[in-house]
Image (cartoon, rainbow, N blue to C red):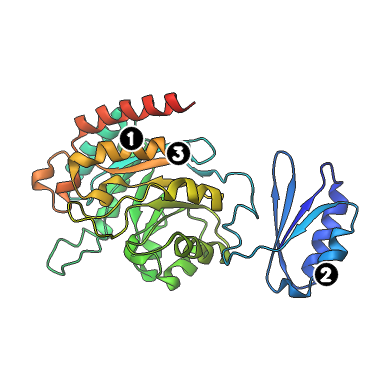
Amino acid sequence: MIVVLKAGVEPEKQERLVDWLKESGVDVHVSVGEYQTVLGLVGDTAKIDMDLIESLDIVDSVKRVSETFKQANRKFHPEDTVVTIGDVKIGGGNFALIAGPCSVESEEQIVSIARDVKAAGANMLRGGAFKPRTSPYDFQGLKAEGLELLKIARRETGLPIVSEIMNVGDIGLFEDVDLLQVGARNMQNFDLLRELGHTDKPILLKRGLANTLKELLMSAEYIMASGNDRIILCERGIRTFGDYFRNTLDLSAVPMLHELSHLPVIVDPSHATGIARMVAPMALAATAAGSDGLIIEVHNDPAHALCDGAQSIRPEEYADLVGKIKAVREALV
């Protein structure tokens, strides 16, 4: 249920209403926008008398929210959420450029790539330390050592770091990681989502390769229900009948997610296509579709990369792409 207050409500009256609603057994989330304040009621709202609330002189309207995702719902939070990570803002008109290798391989490799992508315009560095691989015989990442190498690259460049967390037991290792990524395979790892909800870390939540938008938003709801609303959604392609690329990049998800939710939405064209030459056109299309950022795999020697070299672009290609991304964004203004 949402309660929309009239403009200019006295703080004392609003506080009394919120206290009364909480005493009725529901959680109340207050969203203060430029033109209105919305109270989002979560819990057993069946016992709340809508007519009584609507009759109050400070209330403009009362509505029930039929969608199962509540806190992630734009009806609860009409204004765009802006997630701040260091000096980087994502959402609300702010655009994030996240780049780096699929896997951290060595100090020389990650520092070199970090410097290159920063020079090209990236404002965050991605790098996998724990790698979920389809085959148990493939490179599984450097794990804790990889995270330490990412921190070295951060010291060298000042770029906030992004890395994927796979297990609840590893949360302690990620205390000094700036943005925690939940990969497609873990989108419905509900135990992990709950625990991440108890942290104050921003979370990059990727859509599963066979999941609906509603399921993605419900996964975000798991995190938010545990207390963490610093979530960035990521469209990374879904499995369809397409047979000439890894996945189908569902760019229609970007405007639809913006319509359904207040959370920022970024796009991963690298995992979506699995083909380096397709990354640039899909990145530009994602920018034009209104995404709040891009996460792109960049490697200085894709042919010898230990993971996903086929979808990684070179630093010079990334620099050229960033220039085109900026041109598309300027054209959209």
- Rounded to the nearest angstrom, the CA distance separating label 1 from label 3 is 10 Å
Q: Amino acid at mark 3?
A: Gly
Could you tell me if residue 97 is visible in this image? no
Residue 171, relative to residue 112: is it above or below? below
Direction front: furthest residue: 241
**Residue placed under numbered mark 2 in the picture:** 49
Q: In this rendering, is residue 155 above or below 175? A: above
- Identify the residue at horizontal 29%, vertical 29% (top origin): 120
Label 3 crowd (10 A; few <14 / some 14-19 / many >=20) = some
Give the numbered dot on residue 290.
3
Label 1, residues with CA under 10 Å away: few <14, some 14-19, many ≥20? many
Q: Residue at x 82, y 46 (%)?
A: 6
Quadrant of image for the N terminus: bottom right
Tell whether 210 sits left or right of 242: right
Whichever of callouts 1 and 2 sits on the residue coming sooner in the sequence is 2
Q: Quadrant of residue 24?
A: bottom right
Distance of label 2 from label 3 (alpha carbons): 39 Å
Q: Is residue 292 left or right of residue 29?
A: left
